[in-house]
Amino acid sequence: MPAAIPITIIIPRTLQLIVQLASYQGGPPGVFPENAPGMTLIATLTGRWSNNDPFVGSFQFIPPNFSYGNAYSITMNPDNTGNLIINPFGPGVGGVPTIEHCTIWAVQ
């Protein structure tokens, strides 16, 4: 009789970054006036593993857009979600209608 050989199947898991845009004073999600103050919530960030393992990492700005010239900052919450906010020490946002890109990565 052949010997039983244990086989381990490894299914790679992927990490998803879920971004939920906030509204400013009842306006449409993701649209903010140029005078929106520092610390204004732009979006809530959530990391989710494809196999439902808990995410216990953080969020970082990465290339190519980083934090749009320090216009934005990320704060972490006790439940491992993050907040994308207007950086209170940054240059502010807006001006004429613009689209400002930042690039964020979830890291565990």
Image: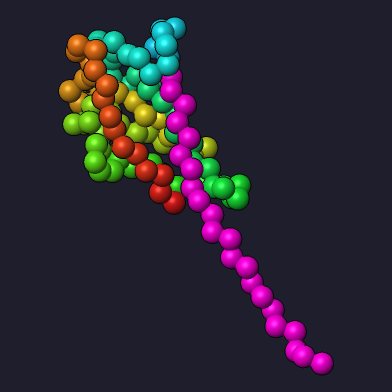
| Location of residue 106 (image quadrant) | top left
How many marks can you see? Answer: 0
Q: Residue at x 66, y 75 (%)?
A: 7
* Screen quadrant of the N terminus: bottom right
Scheme of colours in the image: rainbow
- Which range is magenta? 1-22
Query: Is residue 57 inside the magenta stretch?
Result: no
Image height check: is 33 above or below 66?
A: above
Image height check: is 97 above or below 1?
A: above
Q: Which residue is drawn at 43% across and 23% down?
A: 21
Query: Is residue 13 inside the magenta stretch?
Result: yes
Residue 77 can be seen, yes or no: no
Q: Which residue lies furthest to the bottom in this view?
A: 1
Q: How far across and down, in percent of the image, does residue 52 sit?
A: 61, 47
Q: How far across and down, in percent of the image, does residue 83 sit?
A: 41, 30
Q: Which residue is drawn at 45% across and 47% down?
A: 57
| Location of residue 41 (image quadrant) | top left
Residue 47 can be seen, yes or no: yes
Give the left or right position of residue 4, taking residue 56 as reference: right
Q: Which residue lies furthest to the right in this view?
A: 1
Front residue (pair 90, 101): 101
Q: Residue furthest front?
A: 1
Give the left or right position of residue 83, taking residue 47 as reference: left
Q: How far across and down, in percent of the image, does residue 79 sit?
A: 52, 37
Q: Residue at x 24, y 41 (%)?
A: 64
Main secondary structure of the magenta stretch: loop
Q: How far across and down, in percent of the image, does residue 100 sit?
A: 26, 25
